[in-house]
Image: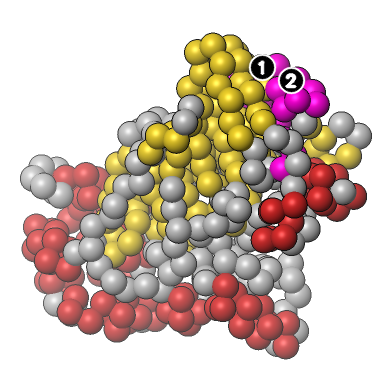
């Protein structure tokens, strides 16, 4: 087992208090947006004298176990994060594997450097993700049922908005993203500020906030077409390829396939490529199904369609024994635990994390506390 020292990403939308509080530190001097636990080449977790990336490369079978090595190759298939959104993130979607492979080749052929700001595809992988709230968490996720969006637009009573053809979401979205709609966005933002009651009060409140933060940005109109989801602690959303989403506010753990492929649709100073976004977006509209954990032995497990990752939680009072089938990253979020994989033991307090190799047989957690476990399905 390896104790992890993790990189904090200082993105502007982060919080000075959330990750610090979880780790028992005083507020940070700069914004802290994401804590990365894993072996992503751009910020691998550090382990004693090395990095987790190097450890896995040196002895893949020992680090990953036979099954995960066979299924996913000599790399950790997932990236695990604590995410703290004080401010909204950009409107975005992620590609499928086929789209990522094609896009990566296309950008290579076009001579766009892999670290160029206008590069969409930084690797050949898809990036399904699961966000599980550690407290109240607000997100935009997938296109809202058309009739409901029509009702919201009627409540806002902006003629230019009501004139949009929601029967053809794809074309309407393309029009919004490719023409100058800034005047309409200003009008809609003002209407959102006025709509303080009724069934769409929360949607309007967020429409107003996004309009203030990104004046005239077409992404604000896009945001108003998406489901506004409020998660309580332990509730999660799964974001498959093509799902248009934006995290708005809150603290959670996030687990994803090991990729950095993002296509943005506005509300960001970063690169926005509408044509490529249109290629991957899923325009099916409807309500979001929250992912709730199911019981499996001592664990609660959030099951998804992704094989590269699986999130589980152990609420331990005494002892919990977990079968190790693939590598595990265990993150303690409260209380005090001891992790024991048969080869070594590590004490865990809130904010501490360890890597348990896939070749271990059992992970035993002792004490009183909660740990989130990230692993893969093999
Ligand atoms: Zn995303």
**Foreground of the two, 207 or 289:** 289
Q: Does the magenta-highlighted stretch encompass residue 366?
A: no
Badge 1 residue CB within 8 Å of ligand 1: no
Q: Position of residue 40 (x, y in %)?
A: 72, 52
Residue 197 visible in the shown view? yes
- Residue 4 sits in which quadrant? top right
In the displayed structure, 377 sits above or below 302; it is: below
**Foreground of the two, 77 or 101:** 77
Side of 292 where 153 appears, left or right = left
Crowding near pointer 1: few (<14 within 10 Å), some, many (20+)?
some
**Disc 2, disc 1: CB below 8 Å?**
yes
Q: Does the magenta-highlighted stretch encompass residue 342?
A: yes
Report the residue at 54% width, 11% height from top.
318
In the displayed structure, 304 sits above or below 143; it is: above
Side of 13 where 289 appears, left or right = left
Crowding near pointer 2: few (<14 within 10 Å), some, many (20+)?
some
Q: Mark 1 = which residue?
A: 338
Q: Position of residue 122 (x, y in %)?
A: 68, 68
Report the residue at 37% width, 72% height from top.
282
Residue 30 visible in the shown view? no
Q: Mark 2 = which residue?
A: 346
Q: Which residues are magenta?
A: 340-358
């Amino acid at each position: 087992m390896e104790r992890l020292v993790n990189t904090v990403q200082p993105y502007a939308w982060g919080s000075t208090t959330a990750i610090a509080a979880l780790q028992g530190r005083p507020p940070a001097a700069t914004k802290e947006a994401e804590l990365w636990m894993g072996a992503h080449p751009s910020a691998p977790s550090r382990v004693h004298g090395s990095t987790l990336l190097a450890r896995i490369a040196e002895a893949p079978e020992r680090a990953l176990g036979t099954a995960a090595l066979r299924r996913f190759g000599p790399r950790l298939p997932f990236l695990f994060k604590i995410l703290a959104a004080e401010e909204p993130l950009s409107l975005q979607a992620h590609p499928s594997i086929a789209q990522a492979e094609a896009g990566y080749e296309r950008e290579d052929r076009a001579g766009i450097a892999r670290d160029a700001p206008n590069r969409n595809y930084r690797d050949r992988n898809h990036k399904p993700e699961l966000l599980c709230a550690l407290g109240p968490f607000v997100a935009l996720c997938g296109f809202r049922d058309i009739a409901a969006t029509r009702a919201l637009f009627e409540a806002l009573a902006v003629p230019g908005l009501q004139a949009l053809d929601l029967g053809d979401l794809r074309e309407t979205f393309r029009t919004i993203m490719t023409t100058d709609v800034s005047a309409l966005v200003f009008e809609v933002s003002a209407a959102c500020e006025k709509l303080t009651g009724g069934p769409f009060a929360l949607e309007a409140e967020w429409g107003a906030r996004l309009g203030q933060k990104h004046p005239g940005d077409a992404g604000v109109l896009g945001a108003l077409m998406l489901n506004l989801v409020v998660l309580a602690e332990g509730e999660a959303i799964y974001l498959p390829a093509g799902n248009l989403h934006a995290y708005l506010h809150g603290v959670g753990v996030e687990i994803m396939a090991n990729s950095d492929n993002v296509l943005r649709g506005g509300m960001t100073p970063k690169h926005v490529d509408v044509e490529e976004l249109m290629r991957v977006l899923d325009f099916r509209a409807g309500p979001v199904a929250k992912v709730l954990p199911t019981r499996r032995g001592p664990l609660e497990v959030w099951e998804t369609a992704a094989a590269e990752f699986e999130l589980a939680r152990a609420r331990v009072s005494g002892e919990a024994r977990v079968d190790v089938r693939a590598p595990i990253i265990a993150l303690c979020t409260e209380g005090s635990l001891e992790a024991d994989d048969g080869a070594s033991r590590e004490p865990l307090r809130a904010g501490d994390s360890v890597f348990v190799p896939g070749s271990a047989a059992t992970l035993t957690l002792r004490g009183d506390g909660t740990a989130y476990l990230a692993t893969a399905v093999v």
